[in-house]
Image: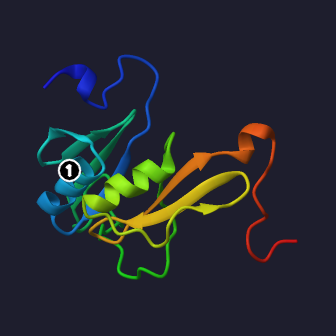
Amino acid sequence: MRREDLPAPESGLLLTHFLTVADVPRSRAFYSEVLGGEVVLAQNPCIVKLANSWIIMNPGGGPTPDKPDVTLRPPDDPGTATSFINIRVADIERCHREWSALGAEFLTAPLDRKAELRCYLRDPDGYLIEVGQATGLLEGILADPPAGEG
């Protein structure tokens, strides 16, 4: 294990994403074999380097001394999301085709949202992942406002 493979900056900070997962080997396989990440640490915690970031995964559990009132668990309602991973790609059609062939299940094919082409998939625990390719945004074209806004 090399220091540069770990989310451990020598100065400043970097951002990682932590996921509470039901089955570490299953999630590790998804993020490494389907999305193409590099397994840095297999477990305790599992760390997968994905592009220029890291996904950190561990099973859920009860409170700990540093989070005394917090219990971690994977999502239990696929129809509700409070956050999601956002992956930006250079070629969304290629990404959709390759990841689908490796078992990724997308909610839809990539759709034109004016500012970007975009689609979503779920990981094995039901976490939502947005995959987007900037298109109109590069020309100053913004996306439609969120649903419910003028």
Residue 124, x across and y down, in percent: 26, 68
- Can you say which quadrant of the picture contains the N terminus? top left
Residue 104 position (above or below residue 51): below
Q: Nearer the viewer, residue 37 or 64?
A: 37
Residue 89 position (above or below residue 75): above
Q: Three-letter amino acid code at disc 1? A: Glu
Q: Secondary structure at mark 1?
A: helix
Q: Is residue 67 visible?
A: no
- Can you say which quadrant of the picture contains the C terminus? bottom right
Which residue is located at x 31 percent, y 52 percent? Answer: 66
Which residue is located at x 33 percent, y 53 percent? Answer: 98
State left or right for residue 92 relative to residue 49: right
Q: Nearer the viewer, residue 32 or 4?
A: 32
The residue sitting at the right extreme is 150
State left or right for residue 15 relative to residue 49: right
Q: Which residue is mark 1?
A: 33
Residue 128, x across and y down, in percent: 43, 66
Which residue is located at x 24 percent, y 43 percent? Answer: 48
Residue 65 position (above or below residue 140): below
The residue sitting at the top extreme is 10
